[in-house]
Image: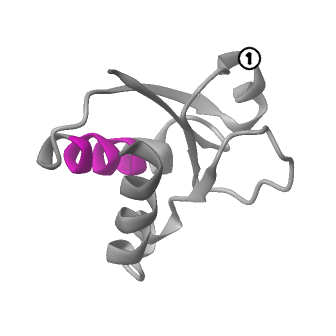
Amino acid sequence: MKKKVIVACGGAVATSTVAANAVVDLAKENGIDVEIAQVRISEIESNLPADLIVTTSKVKRDFGVPLITGMPFISGIGVEKTKEKILDVLK
């Protein structure tokens, strides 16, 4: 069953591309079929429903969907823990 992951940042270009690629690679490595919606933070709601939201910016709003920060994919700090959290949601 395909899982929809929204990957969002301020401009839907630079940091969300890094995070989206990391999520795609992680899903492939674990045999999970994913569909990625790469959007701006302001476009999250219009891309719901989804199974997971990964953001590279701070988001305080609750969309009723698990939300994980993708900043470790940018900073390189805490990547393994972030991958575990993503897998917990998608499996």
Q: Nearer the viewer, residue 34 or 8?
A: 34
- Split into 4 quadrants, where in the image is the C terminus? top left
Above/below status of 78 relative to 34:
below
- In the visual, does 21 lie left or right of 67? left
At which x and y percent is residue 30?
17, 48
Tell me the kind of residue under disc 1.
Answer: Ser
Disc 1 secondary structure class: helix
Label 1 Cα neighbours within 10 Å, binned few <14 / some 14-19 / many ≥20: few
Color theme of the render: one colour
At which x and y percent is residue 52?
55, 40
At which x and y percent is residue 49?
65, 21
**Residue at the spot 67% in from the left edge and 56% down from the top edge:** 57
Residue furthest to the top: 46
- Residue 34 occupies which quadrant of the picture? top left
Q: Which residues are magenta?
A: 18-27
Above/below status of 37 relative to 21:
above
**Residue at the spot 54% in from the left edge and 33% down from the top edge:** 51
Please say whether residue 22 is one of the residues in the magenta stretch: yes
Q: Main secondary structure of the magenta part?
A: helix
- Split into 4 quadrants, where in the image is the N terminus? top left
Q: Which residue is mark 1?
A: 46
Above/below status of 63 relative to 61:
above
**Residue at the spot 70% in from the left edge and 29% down from the top edge:** 44
- Residue 32 occupies which quadrant of the picture? top left
Q: Nearer the viewer, residue 47 or 76?
A: 47
Please say whether residue 44 is one of the residues in the magenta stretch: no
Give the total number of marks visible in the rendering.
1
Residue furthest to the bottom: 77
**Residue at the spot 68% in from the left edge and 40% down from the top edge:** 65
